[in-house]
Amino acid sequence: AQKITQTQPGMFVQEKEAVTLDCTYDTSDPSYGLFWYKQPSSGEMIFLIYQGSYDQQNATEGRYSLNFQKARKSANLVISASQLGDSAMYFCAMRGGAGGTSYGKLTFGQGTILTVHP
Amino acid sequence: GAVVSQHPSRVICKSGTSVKIECRSLDFQATTMFWYRQFPKQSLMLMATSNEGSKATYEQGVEKDKFLINHASLTLSTLTVTSAHPEDSSFYICSGQGWDRGKETQYFGPGTRLLVL
């Protein structure tokens, strides 16, 4: 079984500063993928970044970077230079790898509400 | 990234009626689509996995006869909430598996807000 834990129900950050959103996971699959999605108040799920369990380097996409620490089973999202439009709910999710029982399915964490102050 | 649409975006219905929600992948073929349910300020919970041309696979605790899923083509999956009741009121989101910059990912539709009176 897969489990994703986001321990921060809410986070506040000043505009233009960096913020880290925590995510830890647990799985018995040998390979897996980790995702971060942003969900604004409109409800749409916006894909931000992906990290494969065998990727050697941490994933980066513009202002988003994923601090992947495999031994600690953590996949924290770092948002640099926060903008007011970054205020939203953020979800960490895991997908089991090919051959595993959870392949293709996403398991989501509880989410973190990020508020960016001007 | 790929685009997934959902229709309708909002629906209000009377208790006992059935509601059909469509999920379309607009610019890619999705052999697998997923249906999620989300209550206010909570996480997404996977309801079922929809495979083109075969029966859907439901998660534990999800009633198959209540939530009918049909994946008629590589670009269309439908979820029908049969005999809807107020407790079925929720935000329903679908997703399709696609590729983004060489990596397989899931693209989500904009969601459907269902209110059962």
Image: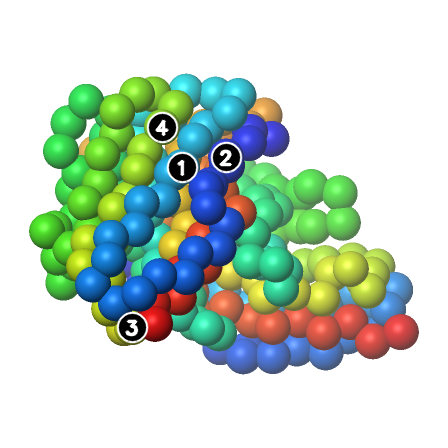
Q: Earlier in the sequence, mark 2 or mark 4?
A: 2
Please state the horizontal and vertical placement of residue B10, each as a whole percent of the image: 48, 55
Q: Secondary structure at mark 4?
A: strand
The answer to whether the residue labelled 3 contacts the one labelled 2, judged by CB atoms less than 8 Å apart, is no
Position of residue B79 measured from the top left corner of the image (x, y, whole percent):
28, 44
In the foreground, A80 or A105: A105
* Element marked by disc 3: helix
- Callouts 4 and 1 close, C-beta under 8 Å: yes
Dot 4 alpha-carbon crowd within 10 angstroms: few under 14, some 14 to 19, many 20 or more: many
The CA distance from mark 3 to mark 1 is 23 Å
Residues tagged 2 and 1 counted as in contact (Cβ below 8 A) = yes
For label 3, count other residues whose C-alpha is less than 10 Å away and answer few (under 14), some (14-19) or many (20+). Answer: some
Badge 4: chain ID: B
Q: Circle 2 sits on which residue?
A: B4
Q: Which mark is residue B76?
A: 4
Provide residue B62's location: percent of width, then percent of height.
16, 58
Q: Which residue is mark 3?
A: B86
Residue at 40 percent across and 37 percent down: it is B23
Considering only order in the chain, which callout, 2 or 3, is on the residue closer to the N terminus?
A: 2
User: How many labels were placed on the picture?
Assistant: 4
Q: Is residue A91 left or right of residue B56?
A: right
